[in-house]
Image: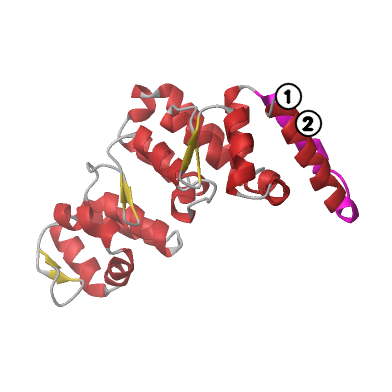
């Protein structure tokens, strides 16, 4: 293959190496993939891959998704990598998602919203090897249409196969320890205002088997906006009563 460059110092002469590096420089590769010189080089090198590339380009994907899909056309055998993330296992994906808690990483969320993870599993035939995990991923894709954050965090716990909550770099194994500590980490009243919004702790409690208590908290969210402060105060009291003894 003729040499293709993404900068004055970075060039490629084979598809496999190029594919491996796409996740490191998504912006530069997006620019390259939209140049006629790339399409010509790919067509001359591998007609089958070129046709796959043309099919993907016709879908008008957003840049990040387009780059991801093209990277696996260039190198379909590599470990999962996307936008400067590289994973050696599905467990590592879940652990990475949880490490940012309670903040949702927008790029990791793409795995669910744009079905990138299930697509990868299918290509690697891991949907057959890890059937239970694959079902969890597909369930998350469906749930994402209703509650994206809850789907994201639920899948994170399932992939990581852990019951440990990582909240602002602090680890918690038991709800009572978390709710006792949250009064130190942040104001309990302020925490209550985000409890139902980010869905992180909700997903954790649900994963631990506290669905009934979680639903009790969710019911408070049905109160009208005019009673928001009243709802938060009530939620704070409920949190303390249910988990802090």
Determine the residue positioned at 58% across, 39% down: 151
Question: Is residue 159 or residue 74 the one in the foreground?
Answer: 159
Q: The residue tagged with tag 1: helix, strand or loop?
A: helix
Marks 2 & 1, CB-CB < 8 Å contact: yes
Q: Return the residue at label 2.
A: 216
Q: Does the magenta stretch include residue 227?
A: yes
Specify few, some or many for label 1: CA neighbours under 10 Å numbering under 14, 14-19, or 20 or more: few
Determine the residue positioned at 58% across, 47% down: 185
User: Residue 50 at what x, y percent from top left?
Assistant: 25, 57
Q: Where are the magenta residues, as a range?
A: 210-228
Question: Is residue 105 or residue 145 the one in the foreground?
Answer: 105
Q: In this view, does 121 lie above or below 207?
A: below
Q: Where on the picture, by quarter, is residue 87?
A: top left
Is residue 198 among the parts visible in the rendering? Answer: yes
Question: Is residue 70 or residue 109 the one in the foreground?
Answer: 109
User: Residue 76 at what x, y percent from top left?
Assistant: 24, 44
Determine the residue positioned at 58% across, 24% down: 208
Left or right, 157 with reference to 37: right
Q: Return the residue at label 1.
A: 212
User: Residue 118 at what x, y percent from top left?
Assistant: 43, 38
Specify few, some or many for label 2: CA neighbours under 10 Å numbering under 14, 14-19, or 20 or more: few
């Amino acid at each position: 293959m003729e040499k293709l460059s993404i900068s004055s110092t970075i060039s490629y002469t084979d598809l496999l190496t190029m594919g491996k590096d796409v996740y490191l420089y998504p912006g530069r590769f997006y620019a390259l993939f939209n140049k006629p010189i790339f399409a010509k080089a790919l067509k001359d090198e591998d007609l089958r891959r070129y046709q796959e590339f043309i099919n993907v380009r016709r879908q008008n994907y957003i840049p990040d998704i387009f780059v991801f899909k093209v990277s696996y056309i260039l190198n379909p055998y590599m470990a999962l990598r996307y936008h400067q993330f590289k994973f050696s296992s599905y467990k590592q994906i879940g652990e990475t998602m949880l490490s940012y808690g309670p903040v949702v990483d927008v790029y990791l969320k793409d795995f669910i919203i744009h079905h990138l993870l299930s697509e990868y599993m299918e290509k690697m035939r891991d949907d057959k090897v890890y059937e239970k995990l694959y079902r969890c991923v597909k369930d998350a894709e469906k749930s994402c249409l209703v509650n994206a954050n809850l789907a994201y965090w639920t899948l994170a716990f399932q992939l990581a196969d852990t019951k440990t909550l990582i909240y602002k770099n602090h680890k918690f194994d038991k709800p009572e320890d978390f709710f006792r500590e949250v009064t130190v980490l942040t104001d309990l009243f302020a925490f209550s205002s985000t409890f139902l919004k980010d869905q992180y702790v909700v997903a954790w409690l649900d994963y631990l088997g506290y669905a009934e208590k979680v639903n009790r908290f969710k019911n408070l969210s049905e109160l009208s906006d005019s009673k928001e402060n009243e709802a938060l105060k009530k939620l704070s009291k409920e949190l303390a009563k249910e988990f802090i003894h």
